[in-house]
Image (cartoon, grey):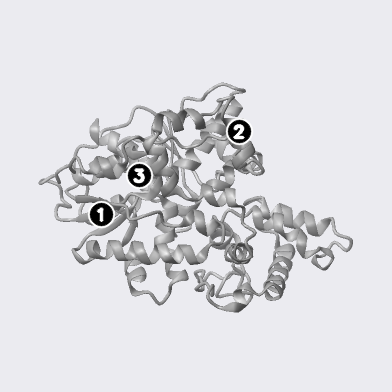
């Protein structure tokens, strides 16, 4: 096996049910093996803050080598990993099938799983990951919740920072008083009988974000698919478990995978494609769940049936052709390609979709925004997250776009916040659209 092999990366199933997975001595030995390889390579220095932290640890040690670094000093390196998978997918020459068998993100996940098993995960941070509970509460009290979490609220944001360790300046998602599931009960748009793709059926996996925070993403997806002849339903059994995965709670993620795959099984049996509205959720369903439960037939079947929303629209365009009616947009679009979209290894499907809009002026930005889910809003991480995302912010600023969107709406808000900082306290007008499917729906609406 040569360094930099052109073979496709291979991801091994997670051995989270093996007692050795939680053996701290064996974990430390594996961390040292991998960190020593990373130290000798350093190709990943500009991806996230994990690698600069690691290299600084080594360079500042007594010998300048890993053997002089204490194991207790590894935690900041682990904490900086956002599980974006970009080192595994785009940078590391030693991923499987290379004999070094290096999977940095899953090693960081293993470390966090050991911490979780020992009860070292912060209770407060665990509460922040309860997106379904928090979303239901936020929706029920939307005006109050949105007032309390609004940036600049001098009464509540310092209190939130002190109690929940959420940085007072970090932009937080707003809640909708009527969830996407509730809106779906009002009736779905009828499939366009003249569309070339008439006969397709899709169930939208709402995701916690589109269900509770940004319902416009879901209604836009409904409208676009119905315009293209697709019979659309919406389902949301529960959160995909990405927030729990970030904290190493693998058993909880496995339980979620079993329940959601069971809930969506009937839809697949009836010939429906499963279309996810958020790339992080799509990644969980396509790749992470099968690695956690490789023997579960329902999980594997769901993975095969699942599409990201941009991927699905492009698939329609390629196989049947799109319905007529797309109109040009009224300005340049800057599109950020989210890391969890890139990790699906499907190409720039968000860009492919928007390029179907006649005459579009599109600037594509493919680099980490620095947000990293809940990681980027925490008090200890927020400034680092802005630093990591600075190259994206600069590109978005130079694009002078009328619309700034991302396949990850949370990343989009993080980029817009970085742009506001460039404006020296002002506010950048990035449009009201967060996800490329919303712009695509606008192009159909004219």
The picture places residue 356, in percent across and down from the top left corner, at 31, 43
**Of marks 2 and 3, which one's residue comes earlier in the chain?**
2
Image position of 328 (left or right of 82): left
Q: For the residue labelled by badge 2, is the local secondary structure a helix, a strand or a loop?
A: helix
Question: Would you call the spot at circle 2 few (<14 residues within 10 Å), some (14-19), or many (20 or more)?
Answer: some
Dot 3: element: helix
The disc, 1 or 3, on the residue closer to the chain's N-terminal end is: 1
Please give the name of the residue rendered at 29% of the width and 58% of the height, measured from the top-left corner: 274
Measured in 3D between alpha carbons, the distance from the residue under mark 2 to the one under mark 1, in whole angstroms, is 40 Å
In this view, the mark in front (2 or 3)? 2
Where does label 3 land, which residue?
211
**What residue sits right under mark 2 in the picture?**
159
Q: Position of residue 108 (x, y in %)?
A: 62, 62
Mark 1 or mark 2, which is nearer the start of the sequence? 2
Tell whether 186 sits left or right of 347. Answer: left
Q: Quadrant of the C terminus?
A: top left
> In which quadrant is the N terminus drawn?
bottom right
| Numbered label attached to residue 154 | none
Is there a contact, CB below 8 Å, between mark 2 and mark 3?
no
Residue at mark 1: 203
x, y percent for residue 135 = 41, 43
Q: Are the two marked residues, 2 and 1, in contact with CB atoms closer than 8 angstroms?
A: no
């Amino acid at each position: 096996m040569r360094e930099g092999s052109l073979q496709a990366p291979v991801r091994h199933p997670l051995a989270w049910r093996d007692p050795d997975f939680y053996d701290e001595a064996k974990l430390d030995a594996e961390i040292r093996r991998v960190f020593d390889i990373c130290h000798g390579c350093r190709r990943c220095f500009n991806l996230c803050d994990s690698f600069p932290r690691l290299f600084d640890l080594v360079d500042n040690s007594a010998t300048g080598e890993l053997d002089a670094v204490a194991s207790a000093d590894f935690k900041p390196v682990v904490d900086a990993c956002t599980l974006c998978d970009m080192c595994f997918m785009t940078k590391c020459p030693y991923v499987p099938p290379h004999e070094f068998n290096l999977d940095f993100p899953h090693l960081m996940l293993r470390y966090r799983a050991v911490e979780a098993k020992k009860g070292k995960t912060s209770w407060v941070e665990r509460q922040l990951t309860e997106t379904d509970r928090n979303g239901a509460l936020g929706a029920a009290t939307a005006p109050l919740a949105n007032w309390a979490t609004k940036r600049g609220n001098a009464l509540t944001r310092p209190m939130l920072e002190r109690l929940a360790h959420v940085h007072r300046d970090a932009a937080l998602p707003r809640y909708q008083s009527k969830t996407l599931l509730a809106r779906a009960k009002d009736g779905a748009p009828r499939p366009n009988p003249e569309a070339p793709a008439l006969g397709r059926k899709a169930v939208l996996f709402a995701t916690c974000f589109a269900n509770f925070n940004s319902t416009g993403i879901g209604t836009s997806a409904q409208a676009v698919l119905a315009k293209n002849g697709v019979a659309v339903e919406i389902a949301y059994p529960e959160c995909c478990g990405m927030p729990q995965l970030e904290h190493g709670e693998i058993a909880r993620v496995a339980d979620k995978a079993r329940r959601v795959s069971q809930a969506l099984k009937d839809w697949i049996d009836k010939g429906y494609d499963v279309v996810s509205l958020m790339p992080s959720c799509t990644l969980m369903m396509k790749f992470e769940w099968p690695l956690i439960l490789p023997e579960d037939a329902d999980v594997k079947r769901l993975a095969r049936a699942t599409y990201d929303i941009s991927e699905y629209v492009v698939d329609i365009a390629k196989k049947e052709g799109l319905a007529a009616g797309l109109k040009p947009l009224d300005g340049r679009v800057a599109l950020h390609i989210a890391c969890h979209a890139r990790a699906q290894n499907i190409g720039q499907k968000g860009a492919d979709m928007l390029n179907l809009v006649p005459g579009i002026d599109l600037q594509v930005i493919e680099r980490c925004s620095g947000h990293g889910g809940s990681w980027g809003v925490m008090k200890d991480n927020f400034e680092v997250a802005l630093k990591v995302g600075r190259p994206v912010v600069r590109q978005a600023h130079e694009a002078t776009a009328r619309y700034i969107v991302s396949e990850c709406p949370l990343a989009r808000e993080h980029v817009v916040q970085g742009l506001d900082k460039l404006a020296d306290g002002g506010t950048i007008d990035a449009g009201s659209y967060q996800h490329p499917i919303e712009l695509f729906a606008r192009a159909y609406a004219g």
